[in-house]
């Protein structure tokens, strides 16, 4: 990213306060322009000249852009690590849940047979009772 990647400078000089405001807007694809306002005194402009001050602002913007790029890369790396940990934890939770469901299923089948045998014993007993009463 070089100095040509930045939008033209917009200068506003306030004669009452003898301050100059340099407003630089940087725009990149898919990103809103982020204004960077540098407040410089008129003495600074008078001593170094407009070209030097504009170059200083361009350099500051380039440093800002590089820091933003590094921060974006760090954020991406941190998010990738977070996503990997999250995926691992979700996989562990799903595996644990499946094990618990399998154990629960075995318990349900066991109790189903217990109740089925109890129901059959009661039914057989009632059949014998009705048959013995009819005799």
Image (spheres, rainbow, N blue to C red):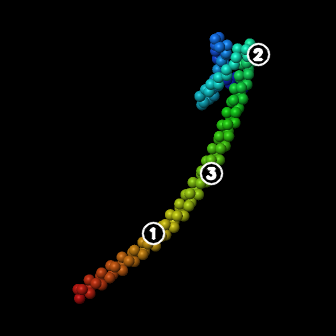
How much space separates mark 1 and mark 3, taking CA atoms? Answer: 34 Å
Look at 59% across and 57% down and name the residue there: 92
Q: Position of residue 124 (x, y in %)?
A: 33, 81
Mark 2 vs mark 3: give the one in front: 2
Q: Earlier in the sequence, mark 1 or mark 3?
A: 3
Instruction: Name the residue furthest bottom.
Output: 135
Look at 74% across and 13% down and name the residue there: 46
Disc 1 target residue: 108
Whether label 2 touches label 3, CB < 8 Å = no
Disc 3 target residue: 85
Instruction: Name the residue furthest front.
Output: 17
Q: Nearer the viewer, residue 57 or 124?
A: 57
Q: Kindly state the secondary structure of the residue where label 3 is placed.
A: helix
Q: Nearer the viewer, residue 74 or 129?
A: 74
Question: Total marks drawn?
Answer: 3
Look at 70% across and 17% down and name the residue there: 41
Q: Kindly state the secondary structure of the residue where label 1 is placed.
A: helix
Is 24 above or below relative to 98?
above
Q: Earlier in the sequence, mark 1 or mark 2?
A: 2
How much space separates mark 1 and mark 2, taking CA atoms? Answer: 86 Å
Mark 1 vs mark 2: give the one in front: 2
Q: Kindly state the secondary structure of the residue where label 2 is placed.
A: helix
Mark identifier at residue 48: 2
Q: Earlier in the sequence, mark 2 or mark 3?
A: 2
Give the left or right position of residue 121, taking residue 10 as reference: left
Mark identifier at residue 10: none
């Amino acid at each position: 990213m070089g100095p040509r990647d930045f939008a033209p400078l917009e200068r506003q000089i306030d004669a009452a306060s003898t301050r100059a405001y340099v407003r630089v807007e940087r725009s990149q694809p898919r990103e809103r322009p982020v204004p960077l306002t540098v407040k410089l005194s008129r003495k600074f402009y008078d001593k170094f000249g407009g070209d030097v001050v504009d170059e200083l602002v361009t350099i500051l913007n380039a440093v800002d852009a590089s820091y933003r790029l590094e921060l974006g890369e760090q954020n991406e790396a941190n998010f990738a690590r977070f996503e990997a940990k999250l995926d691992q934890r979700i996989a562990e939770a799903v595996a644990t849940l499946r094990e618990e469901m399998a154990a629960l299923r075995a318990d349900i089948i066991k109790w189903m047979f217990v109740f089925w045998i109890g129901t059959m014993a009661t039914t057989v007993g009632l059949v014998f009772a009705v048959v013995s009463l009819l005799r």
